[in-house]
Amino acid sequence: IPPKPQPKECTKPEAFQLVSLIRHEEEMQRLMQEKERMEKEVAEMRKFKAQPILD
């Protein structure tokens, strides 16, 4: 019977650094910023501003 081999250390998985995933994250950030900007713009437009009537 051959001797039992020494137990090896488990490999540690690493997350993939795919370009498409990075691009996706950047695009999602850009879309969120655009959405926030549009919401602020709409909120500004909804503010009522009374204008004086000048004769």
Image (spheres, rainbow, N blue to C red):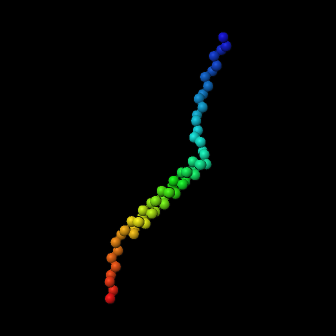
Measured as percent of width and height from the top left, residue 22 is found at 57, 49
Left/right placement of residue 31 relative to residue 3 reads left
Compared to residue 2, the image places residue 17 above or below, namely below
Residue ID at (61%, 25%): 8
Residue ID at (34%, 79%): 51
Quarter placement of the N terminus: top right
Which residue occupies the extreme right position in the image?
2
Compared to residue 52, the image places residue 26 above or below, namely above
Compared to residue 46, the image places residue 13 above or below, namely above
Q: How many marks?
A: 0
Task: Pick the residue in front: 28 or 1.
Answer: 28
Task: Pick the residue in front: 47 or 7.
Answer: 47
Which residue occupies the extreme top position in the image?
1
Left/right placement of residue 19 relative to residue 31 reads right
Quarter placement of the C terminus: bottom left
Residue ID at (51%, 55%): 29
Left/right placement of residue 48 relative to residue 2 reads left
Measured as percent of width and height from the top left, residue 17 is found at 60, 45
Measured as percent of width and height from the top left, residue 48 is found at 34, 72
Left/right placement of residue 38 relative to residue 2 reads left
Residue ID at (54%, 51%): 25
